[in-house]
């Protein structure tokens, strides 16, 4: 369907349909959040390349199509939609499944949870634990029109709550299956992960695509890491190659908390990630690990921001990419060290390998330091696979195709090595070769 | 086994090899010595097929085949092995995966089935023992985080695992202490046989105390200017490279 009325108008009009279907829920306090978003979306325009933050990412293709918000649709649920190959194996986990951003209880297998732990969907949580929703979700920031769009239709999504002192032993495996055979769907999960003090949780999110129609995933994820909490968040983005994926992840870190993010990007026509962490308190540790692979004419844009607002924090960022064919990558990594943030350690590195002459990357590491007693470094390199290493491997009788695969694996190894779940490492290596159409090693 | 005739090669447009001749027969060990910049490493790299080096003339016949027409991987499959002066680190690929891939590719080329897992393991243990490497080193990523000595040792380990016909050692002795030198030489001597040949490229005579050559050649300005037996190496050590340079000049002026 081509866009006849403009994206903003289309989404504002669809909101009337959405609202009419809410029934009693429109009386809930959460509905105020949506109305706040409505006013915001009326004010804001979708970003253009004139906007510095969107300079290299033209969202026109996303706006030229009318996507129907999933909450306004009735889907024929087919349980075969969850394919075995989507699931990560080799470790016990709690499985929660969302289809087009809507919780699917039949496909989920959450299992037993320790007392007080919540692994649920937003819709139920609004009903069952309104005080939690009130406390954490009413203050979500809206920066872009995409954020406003997500908040406007905020209806469902992941909701995790780990109470004080609890450690969830098994990782939570979150499957997002998007797409449909009849409609161009707008899938908008609103995800929330709350780890209270001294708690621990590992969350693996996996986005996959299905159906014949292309779709748009517009996601907002918020992570609240309280004092001493340890949170690992893995994002494996493997959407359909004709579809769009925009996500903003906001992390709020309190004293001595450790947050590790893995942003592994495989598919999609246009991918944009904004990952922002605010180190709000002393002795926090924040790790951003990223891997982006693209081929054909795919576009992948990663914007990260670490705000060192307090002293004695550590941030470590490593983003690596392999771009083939005519794909385009963007990396914009900003580190802000505020005046009071003495004894900050902040490191950032971005490395990209271009596998073809037509692949391009725009990389912009930014370091802004206002404190004087800090250790910071950043750097970006763009290059090709190492010729000498290529020769070395071939000189052992290994054909050039496998030699290339070995070099790819070598290139990504320092990111993959940081993955803490052994069988996930192997799976990711497998996905890398599959995605690049290269022989696996 | 190997016949090099009038070999000429360039690196980045600069002539390095200027008509080099060398005959190596099965079972022989040849040492190629020479001062820095004489073309020793270029010779080793050209023979192994490094595309950074351009052959501009001459021919190389290896086991009755035109070596210069082959890709590096085919040269290896035909039985040529280069121990690198600066071995490359390949993080994320274990020594065992690397070697198993190489062995199976070579076997495939020869029409042989893949090596059995158990046979491979036994072979690894046997060869590692010769070089005093522990099992831990085998499971580690290729050369990653290895010391200079460990890397050189790993090259010889690969040599023993792949068991080629001709081994070219490019300055394998550089940066090795005396103990490591002994271990590495011991590995090379293990490889020596009536059917296998070795070309030892070195700046110093020291290595040749342990790997005793049948022939010593002096490479200077891209040509072999003097050949002799193992005693030539000792003479060089004693008199220095100026001696051959000068004697070459004397010979030329006569």
Image (cartoon, rainbow, N blue to C red):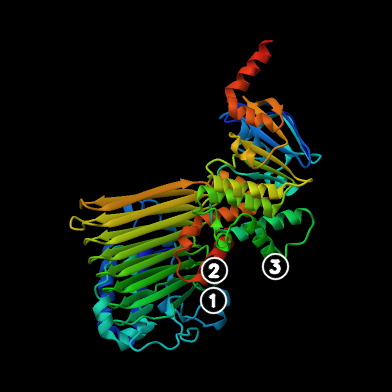
Residue behind mark 1: A89
Q: Chain of mark 3?
A: B
The single residue placed furthest to the top in the displayed view is: B254
Task: Give the quarter of the image for residue A280.
Answer: bottom left
Question: Residue at image x 39%, y 74%?
Answer: A189
Q: Is residue B45 visible?
A: no
Task: Give the quarter of the image for residue A275.
Answer: bottom left
Left or right: residue A17 compared with residue B139: left
Residue behind mark 2: A427
Q: Please, is residue A291 above or below residue A35 in the view?
A: above
Q: Which secondary structure lies at badge 2? A: helix
Residue B45 lies, in percent from the top left, at 63, 38
Residue A253 lies, in percent from the top left, at 28, 69
Q: Which of B209/A242 is in front?
A: B209
Q: Which of B80/B173 is in front?
A: B173
Q: Which secondary structure lies at badge 1? A: loop
Left or right: residue A38 compared with residue A349: left
Q: CA distance from mark 2 to mark 3?
A: 26 Å
Residue behind mark 3: B118
Question: Residue at image x 27%, y 74%?
Answer: A226
- Residue A130: give its label: none
């Amino acid at each position: 369907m081509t866009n006849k009325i403009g994206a903003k108008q289309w989404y504002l009009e669809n909101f009337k349909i959405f609202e009419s279907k809410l029934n009693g829920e429109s009386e809930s306090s959460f509905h105020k959040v949506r109305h706040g978003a409505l006013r915001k979306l009326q004010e804001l325009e979708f970003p253009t390349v004139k906007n510095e933050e969107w300079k290299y990412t033209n969202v026109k293709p996303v706006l030229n199509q009318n996507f129907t918000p999933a909450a306004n649709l009735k889907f024929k649920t087919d349980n075969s939609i969850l394919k075995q190959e989507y699931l990560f194996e080799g470790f016990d986990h709690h499985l929660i499944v969302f289809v087009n951003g809507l919780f699917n209880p039949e496909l989920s297998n959450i299992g037993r949870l320790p007392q007080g732990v919540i692994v649920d969907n937003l819709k139920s949580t609004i009903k069952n634990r309104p005080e939690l929703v009130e406390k954490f979700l009413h203050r979500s920031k809206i920066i872009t029109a995409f954020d406003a769009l997500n908040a406007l239709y905020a209806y469902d999504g992941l909701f995790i709550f780990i109470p004080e002192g609890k450690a969830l032993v098994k990782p939570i495996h979150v499957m997002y299956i998007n797409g449909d055979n009849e409609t161009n769907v707008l899938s908008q999960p609103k995800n929330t992960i709350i780890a209270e003090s001294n708690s621990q949780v590992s969350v693996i999110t996996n986005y996959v695509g299905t159906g014949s129609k292309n779709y748009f995933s517009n996601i907002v994820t918020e992570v609240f890491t309280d004092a001493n909490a340890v949170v690992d968040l893995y994002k494996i983005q493997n959407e359909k190659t004709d579809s769009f994926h925009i996500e903003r992840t906001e992390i709020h870190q309190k004293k001595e908390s450790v947050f590790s993010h893995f942003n592994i990007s495989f598919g999609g026509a246009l991918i944009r990630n904004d990952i922002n962490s605010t180190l709000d308190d002393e002795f926090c540790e924040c790790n951003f690990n990223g891997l982006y692979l693209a081929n054909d004419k795919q576009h992948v844009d990663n914007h990260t921001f670490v705000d060192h607002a307090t002293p004695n924090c550590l941030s470590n960022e490593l983003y690596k990419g392999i771009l083939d064919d005519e794909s385009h990558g963007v990396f914009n990594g900003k580190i802000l060290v505020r005046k009071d943030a003495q004894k900050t350690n902040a490191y950032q590195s971005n490395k990209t390998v271009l596998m073809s002459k037509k692949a391009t990357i725009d990389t912009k590491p930014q370091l802004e330091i206002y404190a004087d007693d800090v250790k910071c470094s950043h750097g970006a390199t763009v290059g090709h696979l190492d010729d000498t290493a290529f020769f070395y491997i071939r000189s052992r009788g290994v054909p050039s195709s496998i030699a290339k695969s070995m070099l790819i694996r070598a290139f990504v190894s320092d990111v993959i090595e940081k993955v803490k779940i052994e069988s996930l490492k192997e799976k990711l290596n497998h996905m890398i070769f599959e995605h690049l159409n290269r022989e696996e090693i | 086994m190997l016949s090099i005739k009038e070999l000429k090669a360039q690196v980045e447009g600069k002539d390095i090899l200027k008509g080099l001749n060398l005959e190596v027969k099965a079972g022989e060990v040849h040492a190629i010595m020479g001062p820095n910049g004489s073309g020793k490493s270029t010779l080793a790299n050209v023979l192994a097929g490094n595309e950074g080096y351009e052959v501009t003339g001459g021919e190389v016949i290896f086991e009755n085949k035109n070596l210069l027409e082959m890709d590096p991987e085919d040269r290896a499959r035909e039985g040529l092995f280069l121990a690198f002066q600066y071995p490359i680190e390949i993080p994320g690929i274990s020594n065992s995966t690397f070697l198993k891939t190489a062995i199976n590719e070579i076997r495939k080329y020869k029409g042989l089935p893949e090596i059995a897992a158990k046979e491979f393991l036994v072979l690894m243990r046997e060869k590692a023992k010769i070089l005093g490497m522990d099992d831990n080193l085998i499971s580690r990523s290729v050369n990653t985080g290895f010391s200079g000595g460990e890397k050189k040792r790993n090259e010889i380990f690969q040599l023993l695992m792949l068991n080629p016909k001709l081994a070219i050692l490019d300055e394998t002795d550089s940066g090795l202490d005396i103990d490591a030198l002994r271990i590495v030489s011991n590995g090379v001597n293990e490889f020596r046989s009536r059917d296998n040949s070795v070309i030892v490229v070195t700046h110093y005579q020291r290595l040749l105390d342990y790997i005793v050559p049948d022939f010593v050649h002096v490479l200077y300005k891209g040509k072999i200017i003097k050949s002799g037996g193992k005693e030539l190496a000792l003479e060089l050590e004693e008199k220095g490279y100026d001696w051959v340079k000068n004697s070459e000049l004397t010979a030329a002026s006569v």
